[in-house]
Amino acid sequence: MIHVKPATSNQIAEIFDNNIFDGANAMIATDTETGEVVGHSKFSIIKGIFTIYDIVPAEKDIWLCDLISRATMNYAINRGIILCSLDKEAPKSAFLLLRYIENEQTDCINIIQLFTMCKNCSKGTKTLDN
């Protein structure tokens, strides 16, 4: 089982080798059996703007990327932020595979829309209201 939670300042320093900027934060994914960190995201919330910089792993483990990405965006939603800005280093090809975005030129995700729409249903796009 995988547990995803916000990283402590010590974990952030360890993951990013103290090479972080002011306002950087991270979510870590940990294997509950071994305690090993198996993935992480790097993001910031600065002046009400939520930005994802990186998700590891991305294309190599799309399931884990989805889990970490959703946990990271849920962190923003819990703080009243509904838009996710994508940094140039964000894993856009993984987000395309996950159908978070329509094309690689997209630089913003509406988190509410992502969480309430089913783009992978055989019946087409649905919302929770349908």
Image (cartoon, rainbow, N blue to C red):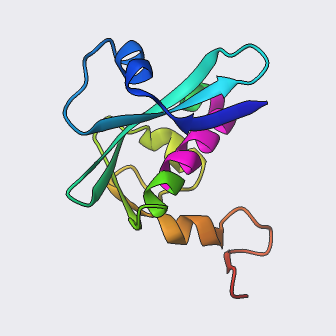
Residue sitting at x 39%, y 23%: 12
Location of residue 63 in the rendering, given as x and y in whole percent from the top left corner: 68, 37
Question: Is 69 in front, or is 20?
Answer: 20
* Extreme residue toward the bottom, this view: 130
Residue 40's place in the image compared with 33, above or below, is below
Residue sitting at x 32%, y 11%: 17
Location of residue 60 in the rendering, given as x and y in whole percent from the top left corner: 60, 25
Location of residue 30 in the rendering, given as x and y in whole percent from the top left corner: 64, 25
- Image position of 117 (left or right of 44): right
Residue sitting at x 36%, y 41%: 43
Hey, which quadrant is residue 80 in on the image? bottom left
Location of residue 112 in the rendering, given as x and y in whole percent from the top left corner: 51, 70
Hey, which quadrant is residue 29 in on the image? top right
Residue sitting at x 79%, y 18%: 33
- Image position of 30 (left or right of 18): right
Q: Quadrant of the N terminus?
A: top right
Magenta-tinted stretch? 61-73
